[in-house]
Image (cartoon, rainbow, N blue to C red):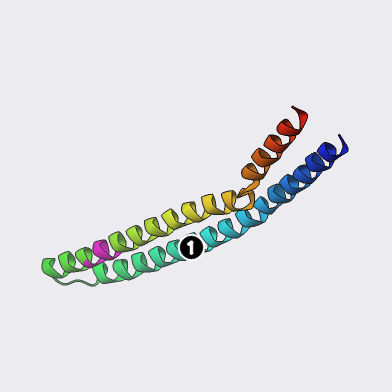
Amino acid sequence: MFDYVDRVQRLSREGFEAATAVPAALTREFEVAAEGQKNYSSKAFQDAQVYARKILGVRSFGEAVEAQTEFLNGARRDYWDRARQLNDFYFNLLEALAKPTEGFVEKISREVTVVSKGSS
């Protein structure tokens, strides 16, 4: 009986430790995402300023088309780079959520099996 109580207490402690590790991992991932978003927004704003200066200084229709094409290609490239970074962020976030509890379910299953065999 006491062995069962000790096992339950140990599993509860391990579960609590795993659960308290999750917020720290989430904080790190969100800090990385926030920094990436800040950098992306800053670069997009700077690129828009450069584009505005270029478009205001054009002397022909061809120069305007060239400036606009250059800006749009850069914006598209930056957008897809940021989309890939966000994809990595979500993957890392899920990984960080799952990592502390890795193997915990298996431990509980083993303990339940041992306890149920012992009580039979």
> Which residue sits at x=74%, y=51%?
17
- Of residue 108 and residue 98, the one placed in the foreground of this image is 108
* Span of residues in magenta: 70-74
**Residue type pointed to by label 1:** Gly
* Residue at which label 1 appears: 36
Location of residue 80 in the rendering, given as x and y in whole percent from the top left corner: 33, 58
- Of residue 30 and residue 48, the one placed in the foreground of this image is 30
Could you say whether the residue bearing mark 1 is in a helix, strand or loop? helix
Q: Quadrant of the N terminus?
A: top right
Which residue lies most toward the top here? 120
> Which residue sits at x=48%, y=63%?
36
Location of residue 71 in the rendering, given as x and y in whole percent from the top left corner: 26, 65
> Which residue sits at x=36%, y=62%?
81
Is 55 above or below relative to 88? below
Describe residue 43's horizontal placement relative to residue 25 as left or right: left
> Which residue sits at x=39%, y=63%?
44
Local packing at callout 1 (Cα closer than 10 Å; few below 14, some 14-19, many 20+) is some
Describe residue 47's horizontal placement relative to residue 119 as left or right: left
> Is residue 4 one of those drawn in magenta?
no
- Say which quarter of the image contains residue 11: top right
